[in-house]
Image (cartoon, coloured by chain):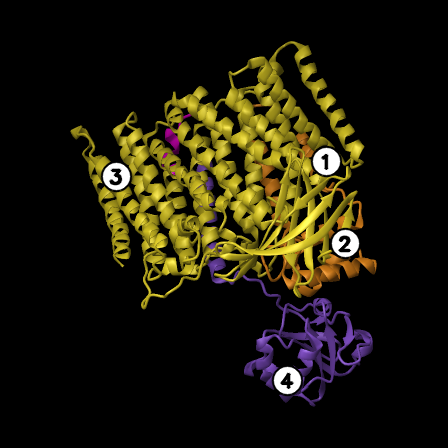
Chain colours: A purple, B orange, C yellow
Amino acid sequence: MKNKIFVTISFVLFAFCFAVFYLGLQKPNIYTPKLDKQIELPNFAGNDFFSGEKVISDNLLKKNSYYIINIWASWCIPCRAEHSFLMALKNKNFNLLGINYKDNNSNAQSFLNELGNPYSKILSDKNGVTSIELGAYGVPETFIVNKEKKIIKKIIGPINNENFNEILELIK
Amino acid sequence: MKKLIFFITFFIFLSNNYLLAVDKPSELENKIFKNLRCLICQGQSIYDSQSDFAESMKIVVRKNLETGMSEKDIYQFMKKNYGEWVLYNPEINKGTYLLWSLPIILFVIGGAIIIRKLGVFKK
Amino acid sequence: MTFNFIGNYSVIISLFLSFAIFFRTIFRLKNLNELIKIDLKKLIFFQFFFILVSFICLLILFINSEFSNITVYYNSHTTKPFFYKVSGLWGNHEGSLLLWLLILTLINFLYFSKSYNRSTKERLLTVIFQQIIIFGFTAFLIFTSNPFNEIFPSPKEGLGLNPILQDPLLAIHPPILYLGYVSTSIIFSSALSSLVMGNVNSKWASHIKNWILCSWIFLTGGILLGSIWAYYELGWGGFWFWDPVENISLMPWISLTALLHCILVLEKRSSLGSWSIILCISTFTLSVCGTFLVRSGILNSVHTFANDPERGLYILIFLFFIIFLSLILYFFYEDKLNFSNKSFGLITKESHILINNWFLMYFLSVILIGTIYPIFLEVISNQRISVGPPFFNKLIIPFLIPFLIFMSLGPNLGWLSSKKIEKKIILLTFFIINLFLSFFILKIIGKVKLLTLLLLAANFYLFFTTVKDFLKKGYKNFSQTVSHLGFSLLILSIILNAIFSKEIIANLKVGEGLSFENNQIIFKKIETSSGPNFEKIVGVFIIKDKKKIDTKFMPEVRIYNQPEVITSEAFIKTSIFKDRFLVINPVKDKTYFNVRYQEKPLMVWIWISTILIIIGGCINFLRNEK
């Protein structure tokens, strides 16, 4: 009797392990941070891209307004691709904040001259600290912040058509 | 059996006595670096990784230490930004109770089997 | 072209041979009473021979850099040194699987020709189990990872081998490790067949013991090589990262070590039979499980392997088939293992081995759970966590203390059970002396922690009792003495290394310097030169130590051209007491270098003590062979 229980348990365990490994194989092994609930926008600091003044997030972000925070760099090729979407988002009913990630100022300047400047404000992030404080993964990355200063969406990688419509949907 | 339980609690107590004493600030820094996992080179801690991302992360950790954040605060901060995955030392929560306790449970079961086998309590 | 063709078809022939042997053996088993000589030896030899042929074909393709072969194209390059063209063969998934098969069939052949003293039925059964394994891996090679695929038109140049793998130690690491892994398959098949035969006894134990030892020696050696490589190539002075891939190699080793101790009891006293069988099965299962976890890419690790979920699925099914088979056989034939159920008593050889196994199984379970728990958690609750060094350290290190103490008491059982109270007192005072010794050592450096103190004391205890045993008993248990001494030295050097390691990290320009604990580190200049398939930047450093002695350090940064990868080669000055380790890394804008200087005490002793452990195994092996 005791033996039978033991046998059953081992076969159940066996089947369970198989199922878990099988399902585990279907999942990606690379980790990308996902936003499963709205989180408070962390405090961050950086220098103004043009004036070089120090800016902290508390002073920068006003209440009751949507923000889109976009991390970009002139050396990043996908950023070029998503730029047209950002331009299309310019002058809507929210603020577009750019964070220039580990970039050379003059290169970034010519990037903007060439493709246009959609941002209402740009912080320059020379050593990557600002983006880490924000919880960003790399460039390009886009955060959507609602009126309560909560991050409601993170887009890792360039914005595409689908994301674009989603953004417009979110900040109506 | 009582002895066995005592024995185990003693060792669990011991395990919180870290092997590496942390005296100097630079040692604390390294300890934190070793406990944070890099998101770019995903198999490495930011201490071992040479990626840009890890370098920036190190700067942030240093900066936070300077502003007086404790080790725990920094882990919380990183966890909030990047999820539990970045911590190499898994926190004890609903998902990890089993992780921490299962080896100990197995150890106790093994001990019970051996005690029976050795016939310690049979006269 | 021709070699591709020959190689491809010899593997297929080998697969068919596997079929042939399998059915022939089953046929033979049915008509056993005919008492004919078994003529399987030739077939088994040919199976090995054809794999050897295809291996040689692939080798020739690699040496001739024939890029029409896709494996060669992805992993070789004409400018690569000859040695790495050869080792490039197993520096990738397909080729390494072929090497695995080669060793598997070779060992199968060796076993078959050396096991003539066993009963015919047992040999036939072993052949059947072996053929299942060989068939599984051959089919895996052919259907999911054929090394002989071609590309047309054939490219002019290959993509090159990952430079991090272009290293002499890493070139010999896989063959050695595989010898260890693959021999566990023999242990597995032999255990299953003797289980079915119902002859798990001391005769079987002495028969399989040498295979266990052999496998254990190679596995230990393989892990050592990998560790040394990680130390100077990958690591920042670390040699063990508790990375999944490393854990996976450690698990069969622990299981095998437990088995090694058990089999001695089975041989001498005919007990612990069913536990030994379980260990035989679990060792091989853990090896295959390791293959699954590594090759499927279900875990992510520093040691990157090409991943493919389809391959993962294949090995997963194969792995669970093997586990299923062994479970069924075990439960079905368990009654045949009629070992007496009487208890061993507290102070006997059996009890000592059981306690040793108890701890080893605990360490194994910590590592196993720590490695696969994240997969389970993700599947079940979508929560993603990392389990890293702190987890393993916390759960393993404290338990090392009683483990070490039991390890020292084990060979002294005679003393413990003796009626004379003085002998017990000697053992106790011995421990107290060691406790004081460790306390003083720690006091001097001012790092007294209870855990470290006890660990150090337990370790010294093991060390001195082993030395005492040697002086008392001489060469009687020489292999055990050597291995145990090696183990205590290993733990001792790891602890002291962890406590005393010092390091400094800074960004420096040429001409700059920094001071570090009475040392002056000066960055003199950089020189550039080129190697066979890389350019190198050599940083010239002068380090002045306390006694004002200058030492020149020349760490390198290598820029490989195919594929374009930058690697850092550490410069290590090794001495008996400490390693001085300097490594540089270019910082993004190239004017600064990230400089890391470390002093790692007793580093070389970690390697020496592991070699000592291996030597212990070798001594035992040679004694048995006589």
Q: Position of residue B117 (x, y in %)?
A: 53, 26
Q: Taking C181 as reference, is C558 left or right?
A: right
Mark 3 = which residue?
A: C45
Other-residue count near label 1 (Cα within 10 Å), few / some / many at <14 / 14–19 / ≥20: many
Q: Taking C58 as reference, is C583 left or right?
A: right
Q: Circle 1 — which element?
A: helix
- Answer with mark 1 or mark 3, whichever residue precedes in sequence: 3
Q: Amino acid at mark 2?
A: Glu
Residues indicated by labels 2 and 1 sit on the same polypeptide chain: no
Q: Amino acid at mark 1?
A: Leu
How far apart are the alpha carbons under marks 2 and 3? 62 Å
Q: Position of residue C107 (x, y in %)?
A: 34, 37
How far apart are the alpha carbons under marks 4 and 2? 39 Å
How far apart are the alpha carbons under marks 2 and 1? 22 Å
Residues indicated by labels 4 and 2 sit on the same polypeptide chain: no
Q: Circle 4 — which element?
A: helix
Chain letter for the residue marked with disc 2 in the picture = B
Residue B1 seen in the current view = no
Q: Which residues are magenta?
A: C330-339
Answer with the quarter of the image where residue C276 lies.
top left
Chain letter for the residue marked with disc 3 in the picture = C
Residue C66 colored in magenta in the image:
no
Q: Position of residue C394 (x, y in %)?
A: 67, 43
